Image (cartoon, rainbow, N blue to C red):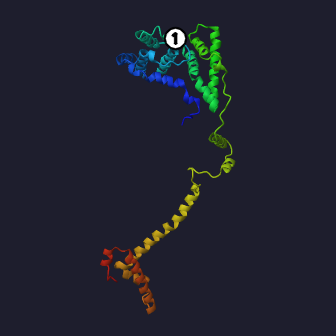
Amino acid sequence: MADQEDFKYNLKSINHYKYLDTYYKFGGSHSECDLLRREFPSKEGIYDFCLSLRGNLEYFDNLKNLDLFTNDKCQYLNCWIHDRLLNLGFDIAGESTTIFLQILKYFTFFKLDEKCKYEFFHIDKNKYEKMKKLYDYVLDFMNIQWYANTYGCSEENKEYINERRRIYQEVKEDCENNTRQAYCIVLKHLKEAYKNDELTSFECTKMKSIPLRAELEGKLQGAHRGDSGDLQHALGPRSDHPGEFPTASAGQTEESSFSSSTPMAVFFPFLGSLLSVFTLYRFTPMGPWLRTRFLPKKMDGTNMGEVETFESVENDYENVNLTPHISKHLIGYNP
């Protein structure tokens, strides 16, 4: 989830470019943009870009004034155009010349020559990206300053600001040597927007404290690189699911399962064998043969009573386990 106290998620420049993508897209000419798509079939997204561009040009007077410097909406429209062209894969060489000429025709068609000129198309990619970062920084600066002073900066925030200060110095030094470079216009606009050099003097002085979670993650990463035993001992038993107590180890579980299943594995085969012998003895012609083979030929009264008692008990358990149909069929059978 985005940190709502981080200025990266509250940049005005991002919202402004989305506004230029969508707000006046309905004003674009579908037929003209379809022609452009046919001319550049490999450029996925050029049709939507064309609709947004022609809508912005037709409703140029209605575009937001950003109140930063003179005619700022024209400069940011040019930034948006060149950024979207780079994203589509165009540059200042080769087939890009054709798209640049087509956009110039759009500006002429909507009679914007006096209000806003198409620029930046002749600036190389590296210098354009530096210029755009500075234009975006001007647009975002009030938000960045407020969030940084109110909530503090992360290390990433600090680097974001320092990078723009470095870019400003690079552009300034380059333009001092050659003031006629097209991208040098950004320095004039920065000075107009912030006359007291606030952009170059601002620094992160209030740093955010490291969250407890991040601190623990750092300790865990350190434990992976070294001996994790001490850390685990300090943190206590861990569970894969919050709120649960630690469970037995896999070895303990397997051992418990093995010990409980072993008696059952012995008992059931033995019981099956016993029932088989008993069935042969009681309900087949082999019964008399088994009696003559394995029982004494002469029994006294006491032994006979014991055998009858045992047989009676066996019959009681047998009748419990037999189905009613089988029990009824076997009543009175006593070989």
User: Could you tell me which residue is drawn at 64 percent across and 20 percent down?
Assistant: 198
User: Could you tell me which residue is drawn at 54 percent across and 25 percent down?
Assistant: 12
Q: In the orientation shown, which residue stands out farthest toward the bottom?
A: 301
Q: Nearer the viewer, residue 164 or 300?
A: 164
Q: Residue 140 vs residue 228: left or right?
A: left
Give the image location of residue 88, x and y in percent. Answer: 46, 20
Q: In the rendered view, would you say 32 is above or below 228? A: above
User: Pointer 1: what residue?
Assistant: 122
Let me know if residue 204 appears in the view: yes
Q: In the rendered view, would you say 234 is above or below 168? A: below
User: Could you tell me which residue is drawn at 41 percent across and 80 percent down?
Assistant: 314
Give the image location of residue 297, x and y in percent. Answer: 42, 88
Regarding mark 1 in the picture, which secondary structure is present there?
Answer: loop
Amino acid marked by disc 1: His
Q: Nearer the viewer, residue 151 or 170?
A: 151
Q: In the rendered view, would you say 250 is above or below 155? A: below
Q: In the rendered view, would you say 205 is above or below 258? A: above
Give the image location of residue 327, x and y in percent. Answer: 33, 77
Q: Quadrant of the N terminus?
A: top right
**Count of numbered badges drawn on the protein:** 1
Q: Nearer the viewer, residue 35 or 221?
A: 35
Asked which quadrant contains residue 42, the reply is top left
Let me know if residue 42 appears in the view: no
